Image (tube, rainbow, N blue to C red):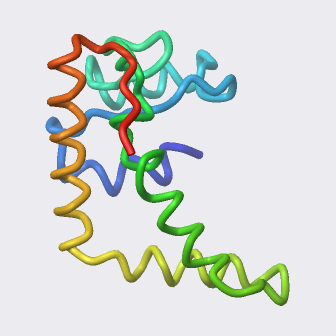
Amino acid sequence: MLEMYAVPQMQQHQPDVIFQQDGAPPHWGMIVRDFLDENFPDRWCGRGGPISWPPRSPNITPLDFFLWGFVKNIVYKTPVPSLDEPKRRIVTTIQNVTPQLLENTWREIEFRLDVLRATKGSHVRIH
């Protein structure tokens, strides 16, 4: 299933893509790791992978420090009247992410990496 979604969109960017995943139990299975080894040889980051998961990674993972909060603030800004409505709002929110928003997020990643380098990976609370 992952192959159907991940590889076609990323194929044009190979070999520059480093696939990052978390250590959730379903992502740690041999079938997943074998797939990543085949499609992202020496270029995937995660539990048991060739690239170690960075220390304090929520500080540098855009999905954690930015996207989920951004989406949640928009989706739940007003009461949700039905079960279909959150899905519609999520899709609309993601479709409306602008290049400027992505550039700002990239600058934030660079800042967070600088902080991690300066502190040698120690825990720092960044707000």
Give how far across and how far down residue 53 sits, in percent: 39, 18
Residue at 53% across / 44% down in the picture?
Answer: 2
Give the left or right position of residue 42, taking residue 23 as reference: left
Give the left or right position of residue 73, taking residue 35 as reference: right
Residue at 26% across / 48% down in the picture?
Answer: 11
Give how far across and how far down residue 125 sits, in percent: 40, 32
Q: Is residue 66 above or below residue 92?
A: above
Q: Quadrant of residue 100?
A: bottom left
Give how far across and how far down residue 47 sits, in percent: 50, 15
Q: Is residue 45 above or below residue 80?
A: above
Q: Is residue 90 above or below residue 41?
A: below
Q: Is residue 93 above or below residue 47?
A: below
Q: Which quarter of the image is occupied by the C terminus?
A: top left
Give how far across and how far down residue 104 sits, in percent: 20, 62
**Residue that protrudes farthest toward the right in the picture:** 82
Q: Nearer the viewer, residue 123 or 6?
A: 123
Q: Nearer the viewer, residue 36 or 107?
A: 107
Residue at 16% across / 52% down in the picture?
Answer: 107
Q: Quadrant of residue 123?
A: top left
Q: Nearer the viewer, residue 68 or 27?
A: 68
Q: Nearer the viewer, residue 60 or 91?
A: 60
Total number of numbered labels? 0
Give the left or right position of residue 52, taking residue 110 as reference: right
